[in-house]
Image (tube, helix red, strand yellow):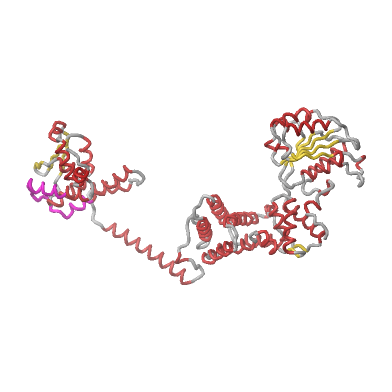
Amino acid sequence: MEHFIVSARKYRPTEFKDVVGQQAITNTLENAIASNHLAQALLFTGPRGVGKTSCARILAKRINQEDGLDNPDEDFAFNIFELDAASNNSVDDIRNLIDQVRIPPQVGRYKVYIIDEVHMLSSAAFNAFLKTLEEPPKHAIFILATTEKHKIIPTILSRCQIFDFKRITVTDIKNHLKNVAQKEGVDAEDDALHIIAQKADGALRDALSIFDRVVSFSGKKLTREAVTENLNVLDYTYYFNITDLIINNNIPSLLLAFDTIVSKGFDAHHFIMGMASHFRDLLVCKNPSTINLLEVGDGVKEMYLKQSNDVTHQFLIDAIELANNCDLKYKTSRNQRLLVELTLLKLASLTFEGEKKKPSHIIIPPNLLVLNSEHTSKQANQNTQSFRTDTKQIITSEKKEPTEPKATKKVITEKKKVSAFSIKSIQKKNELQRELDAKQITKTAKLDSAFSQEELEEAWNEYAERVKKKGQLNFYSHLKMCTPVLKKTTLYLEYPNNTIKVEVERAKGELLAFLQNKLSNHFIDISIKVNETAEKKFVYTPREKFEKLNEINPNLDLLRKEFDLEI
């Protein structure tokens, strides 16, 4: 059985022309060799799998070839030293390397030292390497390779000629995979290779590894279905179907389609990110000058162009915003599936009732889901007309109400200005409501019925008991603290401090309304003043305090007996 070699090793570049997607760097190195302007310290940096180490090996071999001639019998293996800095990152390892640098090559012109993952060297190792890197022997060339340039100290960077390798484009990876498939005798669909190139995320080595895996799964026939199944990638046809359902406001089918996607094992987070990318691609297709930004096959590009004609710019912008917000909230959401379903509902509601612009939070009501039904549209119009009729009747009835006194109108105006975002505003609103109730009661009350002090005290005590039943014990104690003195139609109250006065005045409107209604006299008014000398009559002994509090809350006596307390 023949030994299998993975494609990443089998098709590793051996010449600069074989390197994929790095033409600027390979041309620079070729010209530097030809003009003898090659620096003695080079730094290759970039993402994984883009050709850094391959270019270093090709360069090490080329600079030792006489007149650029390639001799297959001479690979100059003894002139090339590769050091893995991930496992050889100590000061001693660098010192051993420095000792080797002093010895000139036996064959060829240069000794080349390739240090991979150089950012893994310790700070002490970097410092030990500085002097040699700045002034190396004429026969020594250092090539440093790293994926994280920011971790290398600036003194090292300043001594190197830096080459930044870029991510390989999807098109370049797909074309390279097509050549590899032809050499391996694999019949591969263009869409299948495109999905592999997208999955590789700019790394050619990853793309070749994925290619080997998929070929092992599907054999010599590489189809789009086989690639999506093996890589657990959501096929782009799902996104086109979902978008069609969103455009047609078909919420039931939309939710069922999402359930099918989840039941097949696809991640809901990956799905919503794919929807955002799909809407972005549709937006790119709206302008002919930006179509080149769409990295898809020709067949898929036609599908994007066709669907982009069915949606507006505003819809795509709103849809991208909704999908992006769902993506941001997904990790912190307690119910992630519900979050995605709610986003789909909002997306399907964007185009409800034609092109009418609506806020992103609007969701189609359940009774209006089937938009193509004539009955539903008719019912919606009837509901709208009914709502308008009811509103008109309410406005008309308000206009026909009798004219109220100016004071009442003023109160109503003030009430409209009250905000409900603070405690003070709520209290003010309650006071205004009580005053309105008082005004309303006076409309039907007898205006000037006479009443006695006894009737006043009886009504006063009845109101106090109502307050007590409501649980307003503090206000109840204020009412029981002072007996009102009647002079004509004015009630005079005296309290020992201003705090109690303010509390009683705050409830004055409701108290007046009750007394005026109870005593059938709307000329009743209340006058409250503070008499600090009256405080003496409210100084209680401990027992009097206890008995007073016990009247308010009988449980105090139970508490005293339970713990055998003395008064």
Total numbered badges shown on the rendered structure: 0
Quadrant location of residue 190? bottom right
The quarter of the picture where the C terminus appears is top left
Q: Considering only vertical position in the picture, is 567 above or below 194?
A: above
| Residue 101 visible somewhere in the drawing | yes
Q: Within the magenta stretch, is there residue 459? A: yes
Q: Nearer the viewer, residue 493 or 520?
A: 493
Magenta region? 437-463
Q: Nearer the viewer, residue 158 or 561?
A: 561
Q: Considering only vertical position in the picture, is 335 above or below 163?
A: below
| Residue 508 visible somewhere in the drawing | no
On the rendered structure, is 381 left or right of 237? left
Q: Position of residue 268 (x, y in %)?
A: 57, 57
**Outermost residue to the front:** 564
Q: Position of residue 414 (x, y in %)?
A: 30, 45
- Chief SS of the magenta region: helix
The quarter of the picture where the N terminus appears is bottom right
Q: Within the magenta stretch, is there residue 74? A: no
Quadrant location of residue 239? bottom right
Q: Position of residue 431 (x, y in %)?
A: 26, 46
